[in-house]
Amino acid sequence: MRKINPKIDLVFKKKLVTVNLNSKEREYYESEKKVMRDREAVMQTAIENAVDYTKIEIAKGLKADGIPYNIISKNTGLTIEQIEKL
């Protein structure tokens, strides 16, 4: 017996569930999916902002300690111009 990719199987099962919904249930299901996607986007943005903030704080500390900008840039991913502005 051939194995089914678990990701494909999950997508298939989700589609199968929606086929059996009436229009009101489908509308509710779709609105809940949108809420979940929006929450995921908010969480991803928050994580990205936290990473950026951490990089900036590390760069400030390294700059204050006299570490060369090219080393700070290499280790934080910030540009030389961004480091100069800190």
Image (cartoon, helix red, strand yellow):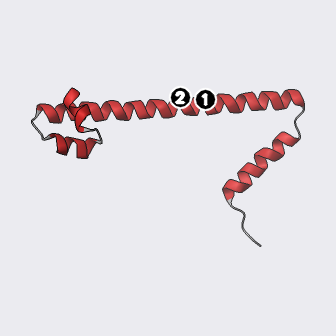
User: Up-down: is 53 above or below 19?
Assistant: above
Number of marks present in the image shown: 2
Q: Which mark is residue 42?
A: 2
Dividing the picture into quadrants, the one containing residue 34 is top right
Q: Circle 1 — which element?
A: helix
Three-letter code, disc 2: Val
Judge the density around disc 2: few (<14), some (14-19), many (≥20) Cα neighbours within 10 Å: few
Three-letter code, disc 1: Asp
Asked if residue 59 lies left or right of residue 30, the reply is: left
Residue on which the image places disc 1:
38
Q: Position of residue 61 (x, y in %)?
A: 17, 32
Task: Inspect this view and state whether residue 86 appears.
Answer: no
Among all residues in the image, which is located at the extreme front?
A: 81
Placement of the C terminus among the 4 image quadrants: top left
Q: Position of residue 19 (x, y in %)?
A: 87, 42
Dividing the picture into quadrants, the one containing residue 64 is top left
Q: Position of residue 27 (x, y in %)?
A: 81, 28
